[in-house]
Amino acid sequence: MADGTAKGFVLWFTGLSGSGKSTLAEKVAGELRSAGRKVEILDGDEVRTHLCKGLGFSKEGRDTNIRRIGYVAHLLARNGVVAITAAISPYRTIRDENRRLCGDFLEVFVDCPLEECMKRDVKGLYKKALAGEIPQFTGVSDPYEPPEKAEVVVRTAEESIEESARKILAAIRAHGYLA
């Protein structure tokens, strides 16, 4: 399938801060680019800085942020691009809303225990959240609703990056998005 005729889709990574979403998104994006696909990564931190600046971390602010990411992903995918999102996206309803909007949508649950995410926390966010310095922090003082029907579940505390990436690429192939 030549890139100009390849069908776009959304690969939606969700999971706690520090679970490995961005790392896996970069790994899978590299593999897809090697296969000749056009790929854009919509990283939660970058989108919040450039597209959603000023939004807070209330439920309403988070929902607006994730809706905006979903809309941009939808635009990319309908133009033949693989849109990869790597954002916590804590609320199931908004992820499902984006699934309906995008249509061609694969959800990847980056399942990693909170304790492991805390160990990986190079920015010290969990420490600050536990000390009450960061209010409304997902997994600590704000909820995270895991997907009920993700197309792929990777367990980054148990699997290597390569193993998780292979599972994701296998699902992409199984859904007909990659030869």
Image (spheres, rainbow, N blue to C red):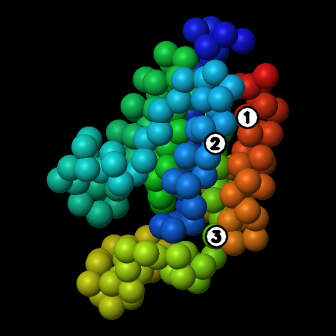
Quadrant of the rendered image containing residue 129: bottom left
Please report whichever mark, 2 or 3, sits nearer to the chain's N-terminal start: 2
**Residue 67, percent from left and from top:** 39, 42
Q: For numbered disc 3, what is the local secondary structure?
A: loop
- Disc 1/disc 3 C-alpha distance (Å): 21 Å
Which residue is at a point 78% across and 48% down the rendered structure image? 167
Which residue is at a point 72% across and 45% down the rendered structure image? 168
**Residue 141 in sight from this viewpoint:** no
Q: For numbered disc 1, what is the local secondary structure?
A: helix
Amino acid of disc 2 = Val
Which residue is at a point 79% across and 22% down the rendered structure image? 179
Amino acid of disc 1 = Ile
Q: Nearer the viewer, mark 1 or mark 2?
A: 2
Q: What label sits on residue 111 in the rendered view?
A: none
Foreground pick, 176 / 65: 176
**Residue 138, percent from left and from top:** 43, 70
Residue that mark 3 sits on? 112
Residue that mark 2 sits on? 28
Q: What label sits on residue 172 in the rendered view?
A: 1
- Disc 2/disc 3 C-alpha distance (Å): 18 Å
Quadrant of the rendered image containing residue 35: top right
- Is 136 on the left-hand or right-hand side of 34? left
Amino acid of disc 3 = Cys
